[in-house]
Image (spheres, grey):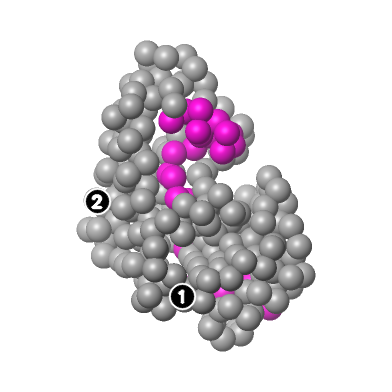
Amino acid sequence: MKPTNYSEISEGANLLHQQILAAGRENPEIKALYKGCQLLFSPLQERPKILLIGFNPGGGYYKWHGKIVEEFEPMEALEYYLNTHPLAEQTKSLFRQAGREEDLKHYTVKSNFYFWATDNVADFNKLLKLLPKKLSQKIFHQARVWTKQLIEELNPELVIAEGFKAYEEIAVLFPEKLQEENLGLVRSFTTPEGVKVMAYKRNQGSIVGKEKITKAINHISLIPKS
C-alpha cells in the first residue's frame, strides 16, 4: 500500500472521528460510549503474511489511560507484543501452537473493520444508532471501502478475521467466493484474486477451539512454515 493511500484513509477516518466527537458534545450518551479511533495495531507493510482484522477496537486504551485513543499512524510493533491482555496472549499462544509465531510477530498487519472504538460490539451498534443518520451511514459505507482497499492493496497471503462478526462483515465485500467452507469453529473462503480469508470463533478475549484452529491455519494458508 502506498503511503499516500494510507494517508487518505487516515485523514478520512480522523474526519469521521472529529464528527463523532462533535456529536458527543451534544449527546452525553454518545460521549460515554465512544472510546476513540485507531487504524493500525502494527507496522504497515506490503505483502504481509497475515492480515488480522477484528470488528472494532475495544476500550482497553481508555481503561488504562483514562482518555480516548487517537492514533492514526502505524505502531512500531504488533500491539500484542507491546501490551498484555487476554486476546493478545490467546493469539500468541495460538500461533505458537501452529508453529507460526515468527509470522505473527514480524510479518503481520493488524487492523479492524471499523476503526472507531467502543467497549464491545453491542456498544458500537448502539453508538451508530445514536449518531446522526448521515454520519452513521458514512461510517458504515467507508468501513467497507477502506477495509476492501486494505485487503486489495496490502495483498496478504492470509486474512484472519478475529471472530465471526468481523468475518461476516468481510464476507460481504466479496460476493464471489471460492472454496467457501464452514467447519463450525472455523469459516473460510478464497477471494477471486486468490487471497485466503478465514475466521475463528471468539468469546470476548478467548479463542474457542485452538487445536482445530491451528490445524486450519496450516491447512488453509499457503504460508511456508518459518
Of all residues shown, which one is farthest toward the bottom?
A: 224
Q: Which residues are magenta?
A: 99-128
Is residue 49 toward the left or the right of residue 183 in the image? left
Residue drawn at the location 33% of the way across and 35% of the way down:
137
Residue drawn at the location 26% of the way across and 52% of the way down:
7
Query: Where residue 95 sits: x, y (%)?
Result: 67, 69
144 up-or-down from 37: above or below: below
- Relative depth, front residue between 219 and 87: 219
> The residue tagged with tag 2: helix, strand or loop?
helix
Mark 1 nearby-residue class (10 Å; few <14, some 14–19, many ≥20): some
Query: Where residue 157 sits: x, y (%)?
Result: 47, 76
Mark 2 nearby-residue class (10 Å; few <14, some 14–19, many ≥20): few
Is residue 171 toward the left or the right of residue 87 in the image? left
Q: Which residue is mark 2?
A: 8
Is residue 26 toward the left or the right of residue 108 in the image? left
Q: Amino acid at mark 2?
A: Glu
72 up-or-down from 164: above or below: above
Q: Which residue is mark 1?
A: 178
Q: Is residue 155 magenta?
A: no
8 up-or-down from 160: above or below: above
Q: Quadrant of residue 226?
A: bottom right
